[in-house]
Image (cartoon, rainbow, N blue to C red):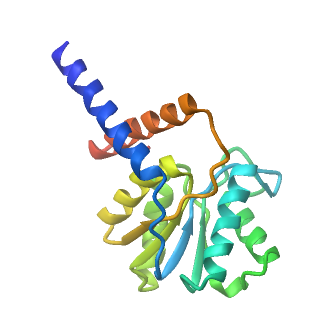
């Protein structure tokens, strides 16, 4: 019982830290902008992925990084990947194809970031601006830091989620972070 109480207390405390960091935008000049994947529907970005990509376009146009990396594998779609759909969308929005790096094999945050890290290390890139939902920033930045990167967060536009939903998402990220810390790749 004491262990369960401790674990719940840890997760709740971590959820508060995640919630605080979710609203911070610490974007600054870096080597690459990493857009975390989200669902795509038959070759079109979902509303969440579109908001992330649009934010990355703004950062790129502000000249905060010379490259944009899209991430994400197939999900449930055998024809398209999140990373590939992201690339196509960015090209349509005026980002030069040669400025886009695609990671299209990851099926989770941890696996996408592991694959992205390998690509970026081979290219000699060491700092990044991560674009995702705010509640995702805490975990993503720490995973990248463990891989040796300096990571800054720039959350996508907030679409006004309900407070209870936002806290639930922060709690889920706390669980995901806790599992990652003990070696479970989620």
Position of 107 with respect to 175 (left or right) is right
Q: How many marks?
A: 0
Q: Where is residue 156 in the image (x, y as percent from the top left)?
A: 61, 58
Residue extending furthest toward the left? 2
The image quarter in which residue 131 lies: bottom right
The N terminus is located in which quarter?
top left
Q: Is residue 179 visible?
A: no
Q: Position of residue 161 (x, y in %)?
A: 63, 38
Q: Looking at the image, is 102 positioned above or below residue 71? A: below
Q: Looking at the image, is 168 positioned above or below residue 28? A: above
Q: Is residue 121 visible?
A: yes
Q: Which residue is more in the foreground, 12 or 104?
A: 12
The image quarter in which residue 126 lies: bottom left
Q: Position of residue 74 (x, y in %)?
A: 67, 52
Q: Looking at the image, is 53 positioned above or below residue 180? A: below
Q: Which residue is more in the foreground, 98 or 155?
A: 155
Q: Which residue is more in the foreground, 44 or 168?
A: 168
Q: Looking at the image, is 163 positioned above or below residue 45? A: above
| Residue at image coords 64%, 56% | 157
| Residue at image coords 44%, 67% | 26
């Amino acid at each position: 019982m004491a262990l369960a109480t401790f674990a719940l207390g840890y997760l709740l405390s971590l959820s508060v830290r995640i919630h605080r960091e979710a609203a911070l935008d610490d974007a600054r000049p870096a080597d690459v902008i990493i857009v975390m994947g989200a669902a795509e529907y038959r070759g079109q970005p979902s509303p969440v992925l579109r908001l992330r990509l649009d934010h990355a376009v703004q950062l790129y146009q502000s000249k905060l990084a010379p490259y944009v990396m899209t991430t994400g594998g197939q999900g449930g779609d055998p024809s398209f990947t999140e990373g590939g759909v992201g690339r196509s969308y960015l090209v349509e929005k005026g980002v030069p194809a040669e400025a886009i790096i695609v990671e299209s094999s990851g099926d989770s945050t941890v696996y996408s970031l592991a694959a992205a890290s390998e690509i970026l290390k081979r290219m000699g890139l060491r700092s990044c601006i991560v674009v995702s939902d705010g509640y995702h920033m805490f975990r993503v930045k720490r995973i990248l830091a463990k891989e040796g990167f300096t990571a800054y967060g720039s959350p996508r536009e907030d679409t006004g989620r309900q407070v209870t939903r936002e806290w639930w998402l922060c709690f889920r990220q706390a669980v995901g972070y806790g599992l990652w810390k003990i070696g479970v790749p989620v």
